[in-house]
C-alpha cells in the first residue's frame, strides 16, 4: 500500500506577483527532477490571493506544480466583504485550499465551526483541502495534545462522508509551537501523532483512514525533511518559511522523494 506524498509551500503574506511568478517558475522547472526519487511526490504552492494569477502561469496544466489558496470562504458568492469562495479560487486556477491554518485560527477568528464550514464548502466544490490541525505548547506540555488534535479533526470532519471526500482531503499536522519557531517536532513526536490521527480515521472512516495522506508542518527545512519522513508514517510536508525560495523548497522535495518511506497500515 502506498499513500500519495506531498510537499506544499505556504507562502503566507509574501511574494508580490512578479516574485511569485519567478519563484513558481523555478519550482516548476525543477519539480520533475527533484521529485524523481524512490517514490513520487506531488508538489504545490499556496501564494497570496493577489499573486495567484501570476503563479498560475507556471502551474498545472502547464507543469506538474499544483496551485492552492491559503484560505477559502465558506460560501461561493454573496454579500461577504473580503471573502474569496471555492468557485473563485477554482476560477483562479487553484486545485484546492489550505483550511484551518493555526494562524487563521489564532488571529482571524477561524473557529472549529468555521473551519468545518470552509472544509465542507471546498470539498463540495470538488476541490482539494489541506486541513490543518495542531496543538499549542500548553497542550503538549500538559499531555493533552492527542485529544486536542482529535477534537479539531472530529469537529472539522463531522457530517462529511469518505465518499464525498475521496482522495481530496489531505491532513496536515502542524504543532503550533513548531510553526515559524525553528523548533521542529522530533520524528517520534510527529510519527506518534500521525499514527494517532490515522487510528482515529480508521475507526471513523474504516478503510478510508489508511490511504489518507497526513503531512507534517512546523519548521521543516532541507536538512530535517529526510529524517522526518524516515521516522515513519509522514506522507510529506506543509512548509512555510523554507518554501519562499525555490531551491530550498526543491531541496525539501528531493529529500522527501529519496528518504526511506515507512508507511504503517
Ligand atoms: C506553516 O505555516 O504552515 C509552517 C509550517 O510554517 P514554517 O515551515 O515556517 O514553520
Image (spheres, helix red, strand yellow):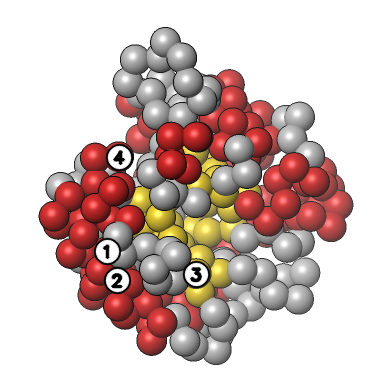
Foreground residue among 19 and 113: 19
Q: Is disc 1 in contact with disc 2, using a CB cutoff of under 8 Å?
A: yes
User: Residue at position x 49%, y 38% from top?
Assistant: 99
Q: Quadrant of residue 120?
A: top right
Left or right of residue 164, residue 137 in this image: left
Residue most extreme to the top: 79
Q: Which mark is residue 80?
A: none
Q: Residues within 10 Å of mark 3 (few under 14, many from 20)?
A: some
Element at badge 1?
helix
Sequence-first disc among 4 and 3: 3
Sequence-first disc among 4 and 2: 2
Q: Say if residue 125 shows up in the picture.
A: yes
Position above or below: 13 against 168:
above
Q: Which mark is residue 27?
A: 2
Q: Is disc 4 in contact with disc 2, using a CB cutoff of under 8 Å?
A: no
User: Residue at position x 31%, y 64% from top?
Assistant: 58
Can you identify the residue that label 3 sits on? 42
Q: Which mark is residue 24?
A: 1
Q: Position of residue 103 (x, y in %)?
A: 35, 35
**What separation in Å lies between label 4 and label 1 (alpha carbons)?**
14 Å
**What separation in Å lies between label 4 and label 2 (alpha carbons)?**
19 Å
Element at badge 3?
strand
Element at badge 4?
helix
**Quadrant of the image containing the C terminus:** bottom right
Q: Quadrant of residue 1?
A: bottom right
Element at badge 2?
helix
Amino acid at each position: 500500500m502506498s499513500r500519495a506524498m506531498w510537499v506544499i509551500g505556504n507562502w503566507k503574506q509574501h511574494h508580490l506577483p512578479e516574485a511569485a511568478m519567478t519563484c513558481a517558475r523555478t519550482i516548476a522547472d525543477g519539480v520533475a527532477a527533484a521529485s524523481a526519487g524512490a517514490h513520487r511526490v506531488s508538489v504545490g504552492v499556496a501564494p497570496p490571493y493577489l499573486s495567484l494569477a501570476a503563479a498560475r502561469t507556471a502551474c498545472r496544466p502547464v507543469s506538474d506544480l499544483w496551485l492552492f489558496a491559503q484560505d477559502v470562504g465558506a460560501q461561493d458568492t454573496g454579500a461577504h466583504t473580503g471573502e474569496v469562495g471555492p468557485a473563485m479560487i477554482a476560477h483562479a486556477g487553484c486545485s484546492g485550499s489550505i483550511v484551518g491554518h493555526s494562524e487563521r485560527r489564532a488571529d482571524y477568528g477561524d473557529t472549529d465551526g468555521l473551519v468545518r464550514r470552509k472544509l465542507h464548502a471546498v470539498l463540495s466544490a470538488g476541490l482539494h483541502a489541506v486541513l490543518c490541525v495542531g496543538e499549542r505548547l500548553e497542550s503538549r506540555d500538559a499531555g493533552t495534545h492527542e485529544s486536542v488534535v482529535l477534537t479539531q479533526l472530529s469537529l472539522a470532519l463531522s457530517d462529511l462522508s469518505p465518499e464525498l471526500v475521496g482522495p481530496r482531503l489531505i491532513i496536515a499536522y502542524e504543532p503550533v509551537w513548531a510553526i515559524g519557531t525553528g523548533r521542529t517536532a522530533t520524528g517520534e513526536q510527529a510519527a506518534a501523532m500521525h499514527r494517532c490521527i490515522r487510528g482515529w480515521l480508521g475507526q471513523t472512516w474504516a478503510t478510508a483512514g489508511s490511504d489518507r495522506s497526513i503531512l507534517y508542518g512546523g519548521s521543516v527545512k532541507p536538512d530535517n525533511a529526510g529524517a522526518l519522513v524516515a521516522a515513519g508514517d509522514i506522507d510529506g510536508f506543509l512548509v512555510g518559511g523554507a518554501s519562499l525560495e525555490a531551491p530550498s523548497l526543491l531541496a525539501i522535495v528531493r529529500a522527501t522523494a529519496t528518504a526511506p518511506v515507512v508507511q504503517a497500515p
